[in-house]
Image (cartoon, rainbow, N blue to C red):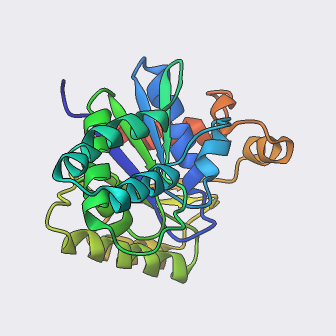
Amino acid sequence: MNAPLIIAFIGKGGVGKTVLSALTGKLFMELGRKVLFIDADPAMGLAASIGAENFKTIGRAREEIIKRARIASTIEEKERLGEVLDYVLLETLYERPGYSLIVMGQTDTLGCYCPVNGLLRRTIGALASNYDAVIIDAEAGIEQVNRQVVESVQYPVIVTDNSLRGVKTALMINGRIGDIPSMKPVQTGVIFNRVESPDPDLVGTVTAGGMLDYEHIGPDPDIREFDLRGTPIIDMPPDAPAPRKLRKILSANGILK
């Protein structure tokens, strides 16, 4: 199958990455695309934003594999770990009509276990090939995506508020993307989210740092109402201000097509 379009929303905490991740998946589903959401933030907010419940996390699956690896005594048992991983990982795939979800979660197992992380990344990559678009709600750093989720991201979308700290975080993330050899994005852009009018100096700092200005999305009272009631963001009406503006931004930059 064709390689999926992979989009990661990254930025400092509290800027609305999770909401934009959920809405982006919604926009692709409205076009009939098959979507895989990856909730890569330990807070697991994306799962709640799309109404997912009773899912098994990758963190839990990883711990199960590590426990099996510790007790494997023969070469044959160790070679079978790959098969066990496929089975355990499929248990983490939360499926609904039009989309699926993988939640990274947290792990309590100490140690690096880099071979297990590598197996997870390759297996998730294989699963991703069954979808048209992969939407990742990431932590502030891109390294976690590279280490545990997928090899590369075509469209890192850095989300910021109207603050110097937010923009400095964007610059830091962009620098880290450039330091990862396998990360070869088509383009890296910045969205000023929940902002009436971005500060021109901050916008200038973004563009001077080699990132595209994806413009801004203003505050949306519908999002506040959905959050207040605990209604899944994915159920927002398509003509609400935030999804309407996000659709315009993603379409204008060749991401939503």
**Whether residue 153 can be seen here:** no
Decide if residue 128 is on the left or right side of residue 160: left
**Placement of 200 over or under 159, stated as above or below:** below
Give percent across and percent down for residue 163: 57, 78
Give percent across and percent down for residue 58: 47, 50
Is 25 or 128 nearer to us in this picture? Answer: 128
Is 78 or 145 nearer to us in this picture? Answer: 78
Give percent across and percent down for residue 256: 37, 34
**Placement of 53 over or under 221, stated as above or below:** above
Q: Residue furthest front?
A: 73
Q: Residue furthest left?
A: 181
Residue name at image x 67 percent, y 44 percent: 48
**Whether residue 36 can be seen here:** yes
Decide if residue 114 is on the left or right side of residue 94: left
Residue 23: quarter of image: top right
Residue name at image x 64 percent, y 58 percent: 194
Give percent across and percent down for residue 223: 73, 45
